[in-house]
Image (cartoon, grey):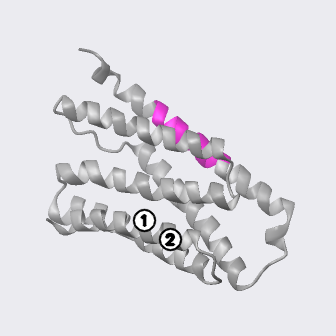
Amino acid sequence: MKLPNILTVSRFGLTAVFVVCLSVSFRWAPVAALLVFGVAALTDALDGHLARHVYGCSAFGKLMDPLADKILTAAAFIGFVELGFMPAWMVTLIISREMMVTGLRLLAVDKGIILSAGIWGKHKTIWQMTFIIAVLMTQAAYSIYPWGFLESGLFWQIVLWSGGAVTALTVWSGILYFRENLSLFSN
């Protein structure tokens, strides 16, 4: 197995560690969750760079890299519902889009076609990761030094509106992806 694929597979293990760090209650758990998520996000960037510029893209990578991203981000978003950072309806829309795109990719594979992520899907992933890291950074900072601002209504409004923007971009990118690949539904 080539290095980009090893990095992709490692993201599954890092996701499990991340979920544990996000779920346990001790002072440094938010810092650990941020660090593990950051390492996982770096493996995503690194495996993509290595696949495109050094090792070449593989069918395994084209299918598993987006799946590893989806599992990592879904774990974070589900954790955010539990922690009260996002409402469940936003996370339901995000995860539904991800599952529908995965289903479309499986349909394509059945027809002998490998669908790579489109430009809007890449933007969606970047903004999802940015949002998740920003929330995790805030939570980590708060665990070290509790700021009064983080307890204010303004902070929660910023988180809610940012989560809403990420949700809207996620849904929009899914609509575009399906529209671009409508031909897969014809016989």
Horizontal and vertical percent for residue 179? 41, 26
- The range drawn in magenta is 164-175
Residue at screen point 28% across, 68% down: 7
Mark 2 secondary-structure assignment: helix
Which quarter of the rendering shows the C terminus?
top left
How far separated are the C-alphas under marks 2 and 1? Answer: 9 Å
Horizontal and vertical percent for residue 55? 16, 64
Mark 1 secondary-structure assignment: helix
Q: Which residue is mark 1?
A: 15
Which quarter of the rendering shows the N terminus?
bottom left
Can residue 95 be seen here? yes
Q: Earlier in the sequence, mark 2 or mark 1?
A: 1
Q: How many marks?
A: 2
111 sits left or right of 126 in the view: left
Label of residue 20 in the image: 2
Would you say the magenta stretch is mainly helix, strand or loop? helix
In this rendered view, identify the residue nearer to me: 167 or 79: 79
Horizontal and vertical percent for residue 119? 40, 44
Callout 2 amino acid: Val
156 sits left or right of 43 in the view: right
Callout 1 amino acid: Thr
**145 vs 64: above or below:** below
- Magenta stretch holds residue 53: no
Disc 2 + disc 1, Cβ < 8 Å: no
The quarter of the picture where residue 134 lies is: bottom right
